Structures are given as C-alpha cells and as structure tokens.
Amino acid sequence: MYKLTNKIANQTYNVILVSDKNGEYRTSFPSVDGNADYERYKIWLAAGNTPEPADVPVIVESKFKGQKPKDLTPDERNEILFGLLLDKNGNIK
C-alpha cells in the first residue's frame, strides 16, 4: 500500500511505501521516472489502486521565522526538521 507525502518547496512529490503486514511506513522514494520503486508504484496505480492521501500539514508559527537557514546552528536546524517529522502528538510520522 502507498501513501502520498506533502510537497515541500519545489521538490517532487514522494510516495511512501507502507508495509502490508503492520501498516508502518518503511521507505520513501521520489516521483521520478526511471526510479525502480516509482516504476512499481505506477504499475500498482495502473492496476486501479489508489494511494492514501497526504496528511494535512500542521502549520505553526516558528520561533525561527524570518531567519535564514545558513544563520541557524545545526541544533536549530534539527529542531525545525524534527518539528516537520512529528505529528501533533509528538510522535514521529
């Protein structure tokens, strides 16, 4: 089973492969022709399957608003990254 992810700043959409056994996310891949995982995904789509939609993004005001990434420390960049990877309950997506 597949699930779409949200588009981030001019990136191609990714598709997340979901494990059939327990529903946990296992890997992701870019939506780029020639990528073996993407080619298998297109075959799956052509067979009439539909991926799960992307999660609705949660938008919060960042304490880093207006700052340039190059001016942030590695720890501050990680804080932003982990904020994008956590759900509203603080669990890793």
Image (tube, rainbow, N blue to C red):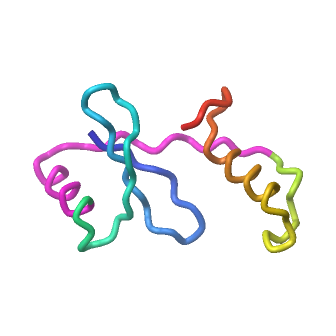
Between 49 and 20, the one lying in front of the other is: 20
Residue appearing at x 19%, y 51% in the figure: 45
Which quadrant would the N terminus be assigned to in this image?
A: top left
Which quadrant would the C terminus be assigned to in this image?
A: top right
Residue 78 on image: x %, y %: 73, 54
Question: Dominant secondary structure of the magenta stretch?
Answer: loop
Q: Is residue 16 magenta?
A: no
Asked if residue 2 lies left or right of residue 11, the reply is left
Residue reaching furthest to the front = 74
Number of marks = 0
Residue reaching furthest to the left = 47
Asked if residue 48 lies left or right of residue 18, the reply is left
Question: Compared with residue 89, is residue 9 higher up or lower down, i.e. above or below?
Answer: below
Q: Is residue 39 magenta?
A: yes
Residue 7 on image: x %, y %: 52, 59
Residue appearing at x 33%, y 70% in the figure: 32
Between 4 and 16, the one lying in front of the other is: 16
Q: Where is residue 12, by image quadrant?
A: bottom left
Residue 13 on image: x %, y %: 43, 61
Residue appearing at x 89%, y 51% in the figure: 63
Q: Which residues are magenta?
A: 38-60
Residue appearing at x 32%, y 25% in the figure: 22
Q: Where is residue 52, by image quadrant?
A: top left
Residue 92 on image: x %, y %: 58, 36
Question: Compared with residue 32, is residue 59 higher up or lower down, i.e. above or below?
Answer: above
Asked if residue 64 lies left or right of residue 1, the reply is right
